[in-house]
Amino acid sequence: MASSVKKERALDIKKVMSAFDSKKRNFIESLSEEERKEFSSYMMIRWGATVQGIPELEEYYLVSCNEKLNKNFFDISTSKHEKLQWLSATTISPGMGNQYHPWIPLKTRKVDSKTVKFLRQFYPMMKDDELELMAELNSKDDLKKLAIKHGWEEKDIKKEL
């Protein structure tokens, strides 16, 4: 019988976000060894970029996080410069007290239809929604012509479409 007991986490995200908002520069050093193992710079950025409040404050956090952290943040090695990453992160908050940082989940990729999978082979850099639109706008005949134009053989086209 599988146990549904949830493992207690050593590091609470509310504690991290409180230190983030109040610019506690020595926060990393104050963590226990167990808490330090659970600390993730990536998760801190994911949580820290969003706040719930007035639209101007929400925009400020998002823009500030993008400008100050997202651009070259991981060029600073986590293993060697965790303190520098944290200090950079503490520059985000405008110093207006603790904010509520809601979690925004990553988009999950939809299950590809056969046509979208087919198109992805020709346009690997396109976003899913663009491929889905392209699949809707083009007939099977159009897609066959595309494949033939790219040197595909009839048997391969039938197999993929």
Image (spheres, grey):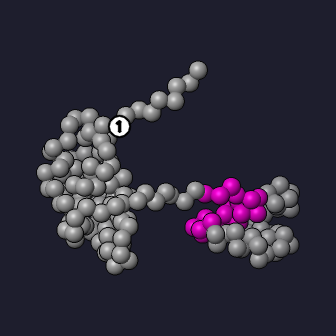
Please give the range of residues in magenta: 109-128
Query: Is residue 53 at least partly visible in the picture?
Result: yes
User: Percent from the top left, x then y, of residue 17?
Assistant: 28, 55
Q: Tell me the amino acid under the disc marked 1.
A: Arg
Q: Left of 9 or right of it: where is 6?
A: right
Where is 146 relative to 108, above or below? below
User: Percent from the top left, x then y, of residue 103?
Assistant: 43, 57
Residue placed most toward the observer, 84 or 57: 57
Where is 121 relative to 14, above or below? below
Q: Left of 35 or right of it: where is 140?
A: right
User: Percent from the top left, x then y, of residue 138?
Assistant: 79, 75
Residue placed most toward the observer, 113 or 152: 113
Name the quadrant containing residue 132: bottom right
Q: Is residue 125 magenta?
A: yes
Rendered residue at 36%/66% (across/down): 51
Rendered residue at 76%/58% (across/down): 114
Rendered residue at 76%/73% (across/down): 136
Quadrant where the image shows the N terminus: top right
Q: Is residue 158 magenta?
A: no
Which residue is label 1 attached to?
Answer: 9
Query: Is residue 67 at least partly visible in the picture?
Result: no
Q: Left of 26 or right of it: where is 66?
A: right
Quadrant where the image shows the C terminus: bottom right
User: Percent from the top left, x then y, of residue 144?
Assistant: 82, 69
Rendered residue at 50%/58% (across/down): 106
Name the quadrant containing residue 20: bottom left
Q: Secondary structure at mark 1?
A: loop
Is disc 1 surrounded by few (<14), some (14 to 19) or many (20+) residues within 10 Å? Answer: few
Residue placed most toward the observer, 156 or 87: 87
